[in-house]
Image (tube, grey):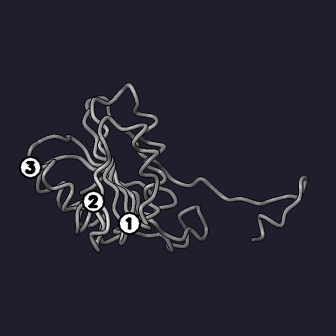
Amino acid sequence: RLVHDLCLGDHLWLRGPFGNGFCVAEQQKRLALVGGGYGVAPLLWLARTQLGVAETIMPIIGARTADDLLYTSRFDELATSSPLLATEDGSRGLRGRITDALLPLLVRGEIDSIFACGPQGMLAALEQLARQHSIPCQLSWEAYMRCAIGICGACEHEGAVLCLDGPVLSGR
């Protein structure tokens, strides 16, 4: 509301961006872009950067309900195949979690890397799947970044300070 109340010429103070984003290595050609909820937004940008570079851009979008799915039509325009959708209530796409949509691709060896943004539980599950299938993953972790210079520790995640080291971290 406050931003909408601004007038032309008003000043607005913004902080960021902080840390590091996704980085696709040359050898990564078959990408799974896995987004949960509003975590889909940065993956749309990543998909755009990989057009004409990657062989496969496989968006996998998940949410609680069909009404919560974001950017499905925008990914239709960018991806090399239609996005895989998963909703927890089964109202659109696969009924279940996003990992249920990703697992068959991993088993068949159709992707060589995972890039993801979403809730922490989803990211932890994706990190485990990537480890089990020996493929690299980059996960964008959400945290409140108070000081943004790595001093306060508010954005610490497993020994990393997300404002400096992240928010995108390579999976263990």
Q: CA distance from mark 3 to mark 2?
A: 20 Å
Q: State the quadrant of the N terminus.
A: bottom right
- Classify mark 3: helix, strand or loop: helix
Q: Which mark is residue 49?
A: none
Q: Amino acid at mark 3?
A: Val
Residue receiving disc 1: 66
Place of residue 18 in the rendered image (x, y in percent of width and height, measured from the top left)? 56, 55
- Classify mark 2: helix, strand or loop: loop
Query: In the image, which is nearer the foreground, mark 3 or mark 1?
Result: 1
Q: CA distance from mark 2 to mark 1?
A: 8 Å
Q: Amino acid at mark 2?
A: Gly
Instruction: Give the quadrant of residue 157.
Output: bottom left
Q: Which mark is residue 93?
A: 2
Task: State yes or no: discs 3 and 2 in contact (Cβ < 8 Å).
Answer: no
In-front residue for pair 168/113: 113
Instruction: Give the quadrant of residue 14.
Output: bottom right
Place of residue 115 in the rendered image (x, y in percent of width and height, measured from the top left)? 33, 49
